[in-house]
Amino acid sequence: MSNPVLERKTAALSGHGATVQGIAMITLLDLGFVVAAAMMAWQHPELFAPHIIVMTFAGLGVGLFACYQPKLATFLGPVYAILEGFLIGVYSLLLETRYPGIVMQAATCTFGIAFACAVLYSTGIVKVTEKFMKIVFTLTLGVATIYIIDLIAWFVFDTNVPLLHENSLAGIAVSVVIICIATARLFVDYEVVTRAVEQGVDAKYEPYYAFGLTVTLIWLYLEILRLMGKTRSRK
């Protein structure tokens, strides 16, 4: 899923301020929920696979609700992480069964990209401007729209958006473009977190920003996994 959550501005600028360390720790906690739920679904796919559609729409609903209710992110963030973890566990097991080793490779690439983006941003090598943020937000919104259309097409008409799931060269190119957008989104996330901390946003909003980072990392992992699945299926 895309990450529009970090574009919202909070009004609370008093009290104990948010910190980068605090947001990072909560992000790791949310990712811990993702991993724990994924492992549960991995070990017991018979309990979760039949409810994949319900969990998909539930995760989407919780994610959208959290975007517009930042004060509830302390609760909604872990709920979203768990729901997405269930989906990730089922999907990852499916691809791991077909292509052994693919999950570890995708996870390594995801955190490798996240770390590299953090280094490039923190050292000032990559500058995030207002124009860059607007472009990335527009692209993210476009991808999110495609995802929603694909989800509806799958649920209602038992079909998919062309190229999104295909292993053709064009389909692979689409995945590469989406991964580039998700990577650019990470830079935007880091910039928004930095600005929030500098502006003295209240610490109670730390789970809100952590939720946003979690959304982007989940999105990046799933797209990398999808790309690897496409490339391996061509061999």
Image: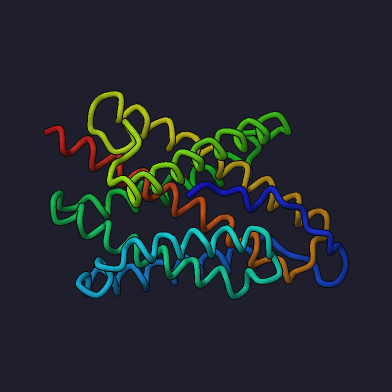
Relative placement, left or right, of 88 versus 77 is: left
Residue 42 at x, y percent in the picture: 24, 68
Of all residues, the one furthest to the front in this rendering is: 157
Give the vertical position of 216 relative to 66 (above or below): above
Image quadrant assignment for residue 153: top left
Relative placement, left or right, of 35 versus 47 is: right
Residue 196 at x, y percent in the picture: 75, 54
Relative placement, left or right, of 192 versus 29 is: right
Residue 128 at x, y percent in the picture: 67, 35
Quadrant of image for the C terminus = top left
Give the vertical position of 63 relative to 182 (above or below): below
Q: Residue at position x 73%, y 33% from top?
A: 130
Relative placement, left or right, of 215 versus 138 is: left
Of all residues, the one furthest to the top in this rendering is: 170
Give the vertical position of 184 relative to 99 (above or below): above
Q: Residue at position x 20%, y 56% from top?
A: 94
Residue 107 vs residue 171, the one in the foreground: 171
Residue 28 vs residue 4, the one in the foreground: 4
Give the vertical position of 142 relative to 40 (above or below): above
Residue 3 vs residue 144, the one in the foreground: 144
Q: Residue at position x 68%, y 65% from top?
A: 69
Structure colour scheme: rainbow
Residue 37 at x, y percent in the picture: 36, 72
Q: Residue at position x 47%, y 52% from top?
A: 217
Count of numbered labels shown in the rendering: 0
